[in-house]
Amino acid sequence: LYRRSGSYNMLMLGLIFLLAGVIIGRPYCRFLCPYGALLNIISRFSWRKVTLTPQDCVHCQLCDVACPFGAIAEPAGIPSEPVLRKRRRWLVAAIALVPILVIAGGWLGAQISGPMSRLNARVALAWQLASEDTGRAFVATEASQAFRNSGRPVKELYAEAARIRSQFKLGGWLWGGFVGLAAGLQLVGLARIKHRDVFEPDPATCVACGRCYTHCPNEIIRLKREQRARAIPLKLVKN
């Protein structure tokens, strides 16, 4: 991609992610990367997290404004009983929807695995040869001519392409199911009943960049006090 020697589809996909990154922080890492999704889940159980001291919070919202990834959750009071009942129904529906999304995502991934498999050079070559033999393609490419001149049986290439397509189909099921699972868990997270008295960093989306600390007025005062406390012994030593 960065050498500008990839296929047209790969270059367009990279361009889409670059443009999306202008308005969305880390779009691929947050929504498509399997490793990022695993970190999203595991980080919820981390024993060391970025926290905001409740007794020092003055609700200035500067931490929320400063966060580049929208990882600061606003305070949420305890909802009323009718709202609680509605949220419980939403939560049950979201949990029941998870397996449906997994199956639907896997099926959709398997359906698009065919076109996606043509990004593979061997599958694309087999498709080109089949198109030439059936009359769907009237112009031979350099790759197809080189393959025919090599003397290799076309059936071997077809068998190799079929094996690659089956791998793509399996990968489509796994990838689609994983995306469906991530979407379902996201819905469950949105439907959960949460209670917060102060602004809190979301451990699943926080990257511990520390910008919330640098914008917190009480944190700035604390850091200045520490700097003065460290500077006093140095002055005594010099004297």
Image (cartoon, rainbow, N blue to C red):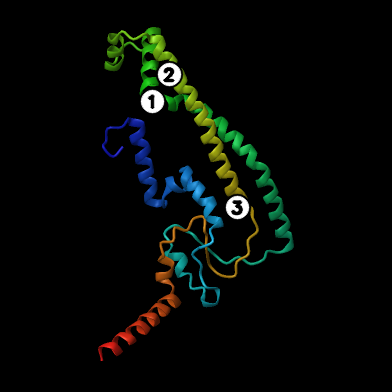
Q: For this rendering, which residue is in front, 12 or 175?
A: 175
The answer to which quarter of the image holds residue 54 is: bottom right
Mark 3 / mark 1, whichever is N-terminal:
1
Q: Which mark is residue 67?
A: none
Element assignment for label 2: helix
User: Which label sits on residue 189?
Assistant: 3
**Left or right of residue 135: residue 96:** right
- Residue at 26 percent across and 16 percent down: it is 142
Q: Nearer the viewer, residue 102 or 151?
A: 151
In which image quadrant can residue 207 be found? bottom left
Looking at the image, which residue sits at the far front?
237
* Residue 16, position as x, y percentages in the image: 38, 41
Q: Which residue is mark 2?
A: 161
Give me the residue at 28% from left, 12% from top: 145
Question: Which image quarter is the C terminus in?
Answer: bottom left
| Residue position for label 1 | 120
| Mark earlier in primary sequence (2, 1) | 1
Q: Is residue 107 above or below residue 132?
A: below
Q: Earlier in the sequence, mark 2 or mark 3?
A: 2
x, y percentage for residue 121? Answer: 35, 23
- Residue 59 position, x and y percent, is 52, 73
The type of residue carrying mark 1 is: Asn
Q: Are marks 2 and 1 in contact (CB under 8 Å)?
A: yes
Identify the residue shown where x is 44% and y is 28%.
Answer: 116
- Give me the C-alpha separation between circle 3 and circle 1: 37 Å
**Disc 1 residue crowd, few under 14, some 14–19, many 20+, Cα 10 Å:** some
Give the amino acid at mark 3. Answer: Gly
Amino acid identity at mark 2: Ala
